């Protein structure tokens, strides 16, 4: 979660850069490792299939942090894999904070008890939890539910602004949505949702139907989320984002498209991923967003350095998708007033 000061600073800088038609990495996501201590059924990581794979060493990541700061970055998320598996994760967080980067970390929470000193430095933390114990443990592994809740409670006790990220799969039920809503309300933390991506999952579970959504059921779940948001449940993304996602008229396996393939009446905001937002994969590949997983084989931070790699980055022909976080971020980047008001409203969950 961004502080109001950083949000204000970001909007001023963004307005100036837009006026000058200048691109800059306002929001950077870095996968600091491909390693993970879980093996979630729907995970789309395919690192084990990549040849000549090389992760960043500490000094390389520190150089990247310094470069993105110099280029105007305000918001940083460290992710993986599982970022807490890196032995130098504390050094990376310390460096990010010394550069005044608003630093968030995405984690499965299993290792939080061993890294309290590190997480205390964060501006916010995002923890993966998919629903009740049954669906969460089915997705993430036996007895992970209790460990995740323990991690959440530690973050709460340390007054770290915390939010939950729940992946919606074909197995997600109305009961799971209801459970998550009451859970975050009781903990006074925020809740995100994310659909599972179209890519081949990491697991070799041949029977796992990771993406073939029951379309009617999927949109029903979105309706329920919207209803909860209207009741002021602590959901991070705006109602606009979920309503726009519901306008997706193509098959759900078509996760990104050029806008001319969608109805002209749709309200998808102009996408600025690749202009003001980018994702650095743990092998150095640079993407506008995770929808481009494995597409940018020739844009690699290892080979080009971040600055040159960012200059080459484009969205190809993609103009729209139904990923709620991307829609919500684009609404903000388009200075959508009601979406901005939503972020001001949910600041009550930022305990720092």
Image (tube, rainbow, N blue to C red):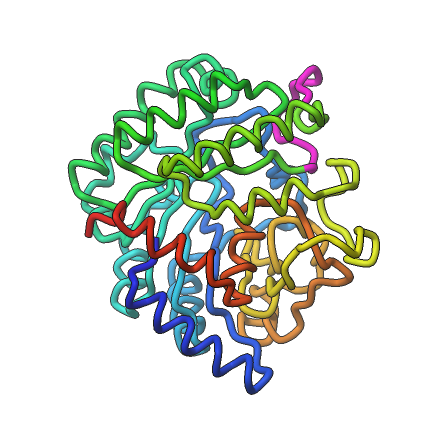
Residue 320 visible in this rendered orientation of the protein: yes
Q: Main secondary structure of the magenta part?
A: loop
Nearest the eye: 279 or 335: 335
Residue 201 within the magenta-colored segment of the rendering: yes
Q: Against 33, is 9 above or below? A: below
Q: Is residue 87 above or below residue 76?
A: above
Q: Nearer the viewer, residue 177 or 202?
A: 177
Report the front residue among 23 and 184: 184
Q: Which residues are magenta?
A: 198-209
Find the residue positioned furthest to the bottom. Answer: 20
What percent of the width, then of the height, locates residue 149?
Answer: 30, 25
The reply, left or right, for residue 107 in relation to residue 219 is left
Along the horizontal axis of the image, is 124 left or right of 26?
left
Out of 278 and 346, give the one closest to the viewer.
346
Q: Is residue 205 magenta?
A: yes
Residue 112 at what x, y percent from top left?
28, 35
Residue 137 in the image: x percent, y percent? 45, 17
Q: Residue at x 43, y 60 (%)?
A: 340
Identify the residue at horizontal 47%, vertical 75% (top origin): 14
**Direction right: furthest residue:** 261
Q: Is residue 127 visible?
A: no
Determine whether, in the image, residue 164 is placed left or right of residue 251: left
Residue 157, image x and y in percent? 16, 36
Residue 197 lies in quadrant: top right
The quadrant holding residue 106 is top left
From this view, report whether residue 226 is shown above or below residue 20: above
């Amino acid at each position: 979660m961004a502080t109001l000061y950083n949000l204000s600073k970001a909007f001023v800088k963004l307005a100036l850069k837009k006026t000058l038609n200048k691109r800059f990495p306002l929001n950077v996501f870095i996968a600091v490792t491909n390693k993970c201590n879980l093996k979630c059924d729907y995970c789309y990581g395919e690192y084990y299939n990549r040849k000549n794979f090389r992760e960043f060493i500490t000094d390389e990541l520190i150089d990247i942090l310094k470069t993105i700061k110099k280029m105007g970055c305000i918001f940083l998320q460290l992710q993986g894999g599982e970022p807490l598996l890196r032995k130098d994760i504390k050094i990376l967080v310390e460096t990010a904070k010394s550069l005044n980067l608003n630093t968030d970390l995405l984690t499965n929470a299993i290792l939080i008890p061993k890294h309290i000193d590190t997480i205390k430095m964060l501006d916010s933390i995002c923890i993966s939890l998919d629903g009740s114990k049954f669906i969460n443990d089915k997705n993430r592994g036996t007895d992970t539910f209790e460990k995740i809740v323990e991690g959440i409670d530690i973050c709460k006790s340390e007054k770290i602004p915390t939010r939950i990220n729940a992946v919606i799969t074909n197995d997600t039920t109305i009961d799971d949505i209801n459970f998550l809503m009451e859970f975050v309300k009781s903990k006074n933390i925020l809740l995100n949702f994310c659909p599972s991506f179209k890519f081949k999952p990491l697991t070799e579970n041949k029977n796992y139907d990771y993406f073939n959504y029951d379309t009617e059921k999927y949109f029903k779940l979105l309706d329920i989320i919207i209803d909860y948001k209207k009741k002021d449940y602590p959901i991070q993304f705006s109602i606009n984002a979920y309503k726009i996602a519901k306008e997706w008229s193509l098959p759900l396996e078509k996760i990104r498209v050029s806008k001319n393939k969608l109805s002209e009446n749709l309200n998808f905001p102009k996408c600025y991923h690749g202009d003001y937002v980018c994702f650095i994969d743990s092998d150095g590949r640079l993407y506008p967003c995770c929808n481009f997983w494995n597409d940018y084989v020739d844009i690699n931070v290892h080979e080009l350095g971040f600055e040159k790699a960012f200059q080459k980055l484009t969205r190809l022909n993609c103009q729209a998708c139904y990923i709620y976080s991307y829609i919500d971020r684009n609404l903000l980047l388009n200075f959508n007033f009601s979406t901005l008001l939503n972020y001001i409203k949910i600041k009550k969950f930022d305990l720092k």
